[in-house]
Amino acid sequence: MSVPVSQIHGSKLNHLIFQIGCYAVLFLFLLFFGFPFYMMAVLASHTAPVDWSQSNPFLFGAHFIDNALALFHDLIFVRAILNSIVIAVLTTLVQIIFCTIAGYLFAKCEFKFKKLLFALIVGSLMIPVFLKIVPLYQMMVFLRWTNTYLPFVVPAIATPFGIFLMKQLIETSLPNALLEAGKMDGLNPYQIIFSIVFPVQKASIAVLATISFIMTWNDYLYAFIMLPNRESFTIPIVIQSMFNTLGGSSYGQLMIANVVTHLPILLVFLFASKQIIRNILAGSIKG
């Protein structure tokens, strides 16, 4: 039985209208979420105070390079960038290694007090961060680790969220048959972890790495407490200090600093976006 030509054209027209509607909605979302970043870049190209009655507030000015050069002449800001990069990268790497191993053990291995230990880990997620800051600070002072990278790297060895996340992801995405095949080939537990678990869990690791990097990079309170010396400041602390010092006298430099702060986050997300999307799609198919 043949389908009428009018019905075929009607279905194509409906599909076209649906596509146009989807792109229109996506474009509105792009404007809504992208406009603050656009204005941040625009303000970075102006000097303060700006007479907006004499210039268009939505167009770029001519002082972007001047503001950038003035900002990067500040050695404290440059040192803060390096501190933030080192802390975020080291914390992320440590968390990836140890949380993946711990997540695998809780997901695929059997040992005594497994359920109790995992319950304690999940329960610790309910403890407010502010209640842990004072004991952590006292511990770091006792160990003389303040103004170093150790207060960030060492606690990242066993973060409850990282262990919980990797346990859930490995439990649903790592086939037991693959592990059994590795054991039959004579692989020891260490070889299974580094030859099977890590390569297979690239998407899960990308999720954990992105979350860890962004949280560490944006952390203000913990860094402010653990790094009291100016030479040890990270980006969020320096930007807050610049805002208190400059106020409204130099919007350009403040906005340049914000642009620099957001670039590593965007780069990390773009680098890991394919793996994150792959993980989401795999979970949806299995669900």
Image (cartoon, rainbow, N blue to C red):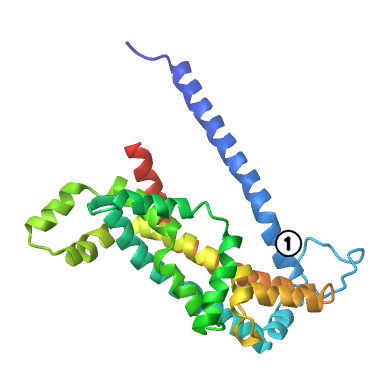
Frontmost residue, 101 versus 177 = 101
- Is residue 236 left or right of 211 when viewed as pictured? right
Q: Amino acid at mark 1?
A: Met
Residue 31 vertical placement versus 185 (above, below): above
**Quadrant of the rendered image containing residue 42:** bottom right
Look at 68% across and 49% down and name the residue there.
Answer: 32
Alpha-carbon neighbours of circle 1 within 10 Å: few (<14), some, or many (≥20)?
A: some
- Is residue 183 left or right of 123 when viewed as pictured? left
Residue 134 is situated, as x and y percent measured from the top left of the image, at 59, 69
- Is residue 100 left or right of 89 when viewed as pictured? left
Q: Is residue 270 shown to the viewer in this render?
A: no
Residue 252 vertical placement versus 268 (above, below): below
Residue 46 is situated, as x and y percent measured from the top left of the image, at 79, 73
Name the residue furthest top.
Answer: 1
Frontmost residue, 172 versus 27 = 172
Residue wearing tag 1: 39
Image quadrant occupied by the N terminus: top left
Counting the numbered discs, the total is 1
Residue 204 vertical placement versus 41 (above, below): above
Look at 71% across and 65% down and name the residue there.
Answer: 40
Frontmost residue, 44 versus 104 = 104
Residue 246 is situated, as x and y percent measured from the top left of the image, at 80, 78
Q: Is residue 245 shown to the viewer in this render?
A: yes
Residue 21 is situated, as x and y percent measured from the top left of the image, at 59, 35
- Is residue 18 left or right of 258 when viewed as pictured? left
Image quadrant occupied by the C terminus: top left
Q: Secondary structure at mark 1?
A: helix
Look at 84% across and 62% down and name the residue there.
Answer: 56
Look at 63% across and 46% down and name the residue there.
Answer: 29
**Quadrant of the rendered image containing residue 229:** bottom right
